[in-house]
Image: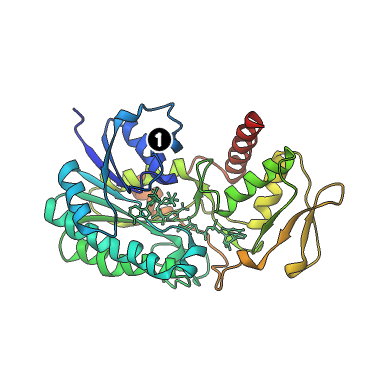
Amino acid sequence: MADKRALITGITGQDGSYLAEHLLNLGYEVWGLVRRTSLDPMMRIDGLVHPRRRIHIVYGNLRDGASLRSALEQSQPHEIYNLAAQSDVGISFKCPDETMEVNYLGVGRLLHEAMHVNPQVRIYHASTSEMFGKTPPPQNEHSPFAPVSPYGEAKLLAYEHFVKPYRDKHGLFMCSGILFNHESPRRGEHFVTRKISMSLAKLKLGLQDDFSLGNLRAVRDWGFAGDYVKAMHLMLQHEKPDDYVIATGTSHSVRDFVETAAKVLEMDVRWTGAGFEEVGLDRNGKVIIRIDEEFYRPVEVQSLRGDASKARRQLGWSPQVSFAGLVDMMVKNDFERLARRS
Ligand code: NAP
Ligand code: G4F
């Protein structure tokens, strides 16, 4: 029997899959909270590394306190990783109520039940660089929060109204990871990096003619999800609970991502036109990328670049995969998978 049990909410998501693998490798007994409509948590883990029976499934929903109580009583975790969220910033403008319900109130429900079941439990909570919003880079733990999206607002409310008070007033061991964008071949297909890697791979294979993007000038600090889940675990092993920025410290625009990804497939992209009329052309002058207002946000976080020196100093954490390495990994994975199918 494993010495340590961990409960992961959001185990069917990108981070949940990498974290489950990491904890299983460390000898943890891993429990995952899933909804009735959730993906099979093993779908992202490919079923190769870990047999399904090594993840214990409990049903629950951050919208439902009783389900969380029952999941906690069943799993009796030493560590909880709260990764569950409505995690799509663009969708948060369309579904602000659901975003608040899960990303803000859901956190309160979980902490309330966790405190009741075991006040000694250690909890990681997934905060986000989206909370910095308008604050210019580089952003660290002392930078002011200034969210511009319902997603960022909900995450900030959860941090201020639940995470900090449960830690500072009620003595719960709570860490808030302020993670900058992290990606992987398991990234949801509606996030921009995966949309680009998939679309270019399809173009290369002749499975698609073109695709549309929104704001090419947005700048993000993109790291590899497999590196970032290790930081989550390290936070809960530290002597005291705290907040940590996790980032690479380098940033690139969406346009850079497209160009770097195209090079991996030996494709050229040449840009012409401006604003919504701008297009990306291939080497034969054919339009392969268009700009569509639909993919613009009502308000945009223009630029994110994190300073993770506190995590480096206190946790000994540093990212291992570079921007070029990440793009290469994502594009090749999509290309090879699609090529096998076609
Ligand atoms: P993701 O792939 O979108 O996964 C989200 C997970 O949340 C899924 O497992 C989903 O389960 C679950 N979920 C959604 N609503 C739920 C509810 N009401 N009750 C229970 N589970 C629910 O997200 P991710 O990229 O792994 O991100 C993990 C966490 O880190 C999120 O909290 C996100 O906001 C935060 N974050 C992510 C990044 C990033 O760049 N990836 C950066 C900063 C912070 P279903 O399968 O049932 O839909
Ligand atoms: O990939 P994105 O949708 O990620 P975004 O909005 O930065 O949010 C992600 O990172 C946050 C951390 O800062 C997480 F908290 C959150 O859960 C999520 O994981 O968009 C990245 C950028 C944006 O500026 C967006 O406007 O790409 C721009 N973009 C341009 N064209 C697009 C598109 N984004 C999407 N999703 N789709 C497009 O076609």
Q: Secondary structure at mark 1?
A: helix
- Which image quarter has ligand 2? bottom right
Q: Is residue 134 visible?
A: yes
Camera-side residue: 219 or 53? Answer: 53
How many numbered marks appear? 1
Question: Which picture quadrant has residue 144?
Answer: bottom left
Q: With 337 as the anchor, is 172 left or right in this view? A: left
Measuring 68% from the left and 41% from the top, which residue is drawn there? 201
| Residue 138 appears in the figure | no
Left or right of 242 in this view: 97: right
Of 243 and 50, the residue lying toward us? 50
User: Looking at the figure, which quarter contains the N terminus?
Assistant: top left
Q: Mark 1 — residue?
A: 42
In the rendered structure, which amino acid carries the disc numbered 1? Met
> Which residue is at 63% across, 31% downward?
341
Q: Is residue 51 above or below residue 198?
A: above
Q: Which of the 4 image quadrants contains residue 41?
A: top left
Above or below, comparing residue 22 to residue 280 in the picture: above
Q: Residue at x 67, y 32 (%)?
A: 342
Image coordinates for residue 59, horizontal then vertical, percent: 27, 46
> Quick check: is the Cβ at mark 1 less than 8 Å away from ligand 1?
no
Kindly indicate the quadrant of the structure image that contains residue 40.
Answer: top left
Packing grade of label 1 (10 A; few <14, some 14-19, many >=20) is some
Give x and y (percent) for residue 44: 45, 38
